[in-house]
Image (tube, rainbow, N blue to C red):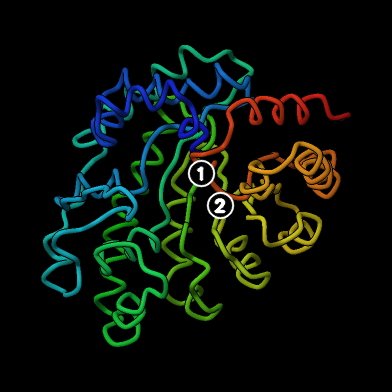
Amino acid sequence: MRQAGRSLPEYRAIREKHGFFDVAGTPELCAEVTLQPVRRHGVDAAVLFADIMSPVLGMGIDVKLVEGVGPVIEEPVRSAADVDRLRVAPPEEWGGPILEAVRIVRAELEPERALVGFCGGPFTVAGYLVEGKPSRDFARTKALMYREPAVWHALMERLAGQFAPYVAALAAAGADVIQLFDSWVGVLSLGDYVEFVAPYSRRVLDAASAPTIHFGTGATEGLLAQMARAGGDAIGVDWRIPLDVAREIVGDRAVQGNLEPALLLGPWERIEAAARDVLERGGRTGHVFNLGHGVLPQTDPDVLTRLTALVQDYPA
């Protein structure tokens, strides 16, 4: 359950003393925050505490995480000259602390628990770089795609060139699974995804020498099918599409998901019924139970622990 730590008091205690990128860039702190949900909830896998913007810090981009806003870029990337300034560097040069955190976590986790490495999708990261901050419609991003496709493809080429070695390095350091997280892919039409995004997501997924999960938020049924074509041993599904429908769409791939995160703010009876429905629709094999997006910060940690026990006790 990505971002499960956000609801934990032990996580908040660390964040009171350290900024996000300070935590992500300090191996011991990054490892500690990654392991906290495993210790608290007993989940079957740890999700690396990293941000989708971590790799672009190594490209010479200044990123600030603004509370209540998200990633903010002081100098957005909107021209060929802006793209030319982006450097592609080996992950060992800029991501050493993250890779060390992976090694620490893998050494501390029991062998039967997985470590999920984490990377943002090239489209979502490109959108933040072009817009300068999160956007509802990504109008500047789409305008760049349509008006200056050469600049767009050059930007995506740079990002894929930075991300592909990164996911390979995560796997080499000990990540058992790599998840590509495309938070904003749902704003795209089917044709735009195929033309402007799919080749670059495929390149990153193909670079990981480990099983991969390909997740996008707000994907329509048609878009989900194209994401499966782009790659991923498992396809992550948000709460908008029932898992049995998703299984028909993605074919022989595993599925991950997809309990609505906000349900965890409701009464247990409703949570339990919805979780059992997800488990039934997901099937007995080829299903990684998860939320349909990140844990909401106001979620009661005890509810997450109870949900974990319900899923683990579900008849195989």
Mark 1 neighbour class, 10 Å CA radius: few under 14, some 14 to 19, many 20 or more: many
Q: Which residue is mark 1?
A: 179
Q: In the displayed structure, would residue 66 be above or below residue 5? A: below
Q: Quadrant where the C terminus lies?
A: top right
Residue at position x 49%, y 39% in the image: 297
The location of residue 69, given as percent across then percent down, is: 32, 55
The location of residue 206, given as percent across then percent down, is: 48, 50
What's under tag 1, amino acid-wise?
A: Gln
The answer to which quarter of the image holds residue 146 is bottom left
Callout 2 secondary element: strand
Depth check, front residue: 248 or 243: 243
Residue at position x 23%, y 41% in the image: 90
Q: Quadrant where the N terminus lies?
A: top right
Q: In the displayed structure, would residue 198 be above or below residue 97? A: below
What's under tag 2, amino acid-wise?
A: His
Depth check, front residue: 100 or 259: 259
CB contact under 8 Å: marks 1 and 2: yes
Q: Earlier in the sequence, mark 1 or mark 2?
A: 1
Residue 214's disc number: 2
> Image check: 302 left or right of 60?
right
Residue at position x 26%, y 38% in the image: 91
Residue at position x 19%, y 67% in the image: 77
> Image check: 119 left or right of 307?
left
Depth check, front residue: 203 or 62: 62
The answer to which quarter of the image holds residue 199 is bottom left
Residue with the most extreme bottom position? 147
Callout 1 secondary element: strand
Query: How far apart, in angstroms, are the residues tagged by discs 1 and 2?
Result: 6 Å
